[in-house]
Image: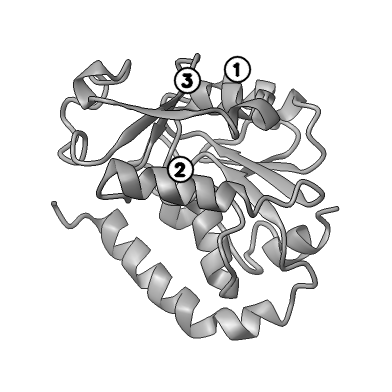
Amino acid sequence: MKLTIETIRIKLRRYYMKKTSNLRKKKIKNTDFTIFSNNCWGGFVYQSYGLAYNSPTIGLFFMAGDYLKFISEVNKWVYAELEFIKPENSKYSSHFKNWDKFGTYPIGKFAGSDIEIHFQHYNSEDEAYNNWKRRTNRINWNKVLYKFNDQNLCTSDHIRKFSNLPHKNKICFTSKDYSIPNTYHIKCPKRYSEIQTSYEPFGNSRVINVNKLINSIT
């Protein structure tokens, strides 16, 4: 796979997180929280504190509309039976036709729905299925944070719908200033039309103190 600037930034971010996780962990009181994330941000946050993954949404991504469907009835879908489809049967196959990674990872669906889960960082359906089920059992429903961003065909309507969800703890990162509640504008290079994962904050950033955010989850 082509080594892009984003790939390099993510590799450097992982290295830095690992080296500094013990120091960062001392700044949080909550260590048993669950993050439902539309992309890899949740996994990065757990890594930044050296914590176990208390969420099934690790190493994967949802398209914007599918993610909103998922978290709108999260208690239903997270425990639904997980099935797998061929890449060519994905409703997003035409969107990803020029992405060299598409077709190399498992794509899951909840039985009885059209919600797709793109297990980007998994090598097999068995690996994706087993990790999803195992981490689902770790969910702490008393301390949940919902995270969204403007990736994967996201529109301003999606961001407004996310902001209007009745969930108590939620946060959204965007590459543009939408002035929508629960949304944080993250400055990225102008060449990007949506936020890049490596620019999403963790720890105590200039935009938001994620340490305080984690400690506020109740």
Q: Say which element carries label 3.
A: loop
Circle 2 packing at 10 Å, graded few (<14), some (14-19), many (20+), is many
Q: Earlier in the sequence, mark 3 or mark 2?
A: 3
Q: Residue at x 59, y 46 (%)?
A: 136
Amino acid type, mark 3: Ala
Disc ID at residue 31: none
Q: Say which element carries label 2.
A: loop
Q: Give the distance between the C-alpha atoms of the residues marked 3 and 2, in whole angstroms.
A: 31 Å
| Residue marked by disc 1 | 157
Judge depth for marks 3 and 1 and give the one in front: 3
| Residue marked by disc 2 | 195
Q: Residue at x 67, y 52 (%)?
A: 34
The spot of residue 19 in percent (x, y) is: 47, 84
In this picture, residue 153 sits left or right of residue 217: left
Q: Residue at x 49, y 15 (%)?
A: 113
Amino acid type, mark 1: Asp
Disc ID at residue 111: 3
Residue toward you, 12 or 50: 50
Circle 3 packing at 10 Å, graded few (<14), some (14-19), many (20+), is few
The spot of residue 147 in percent (x, y) is: 62, 42
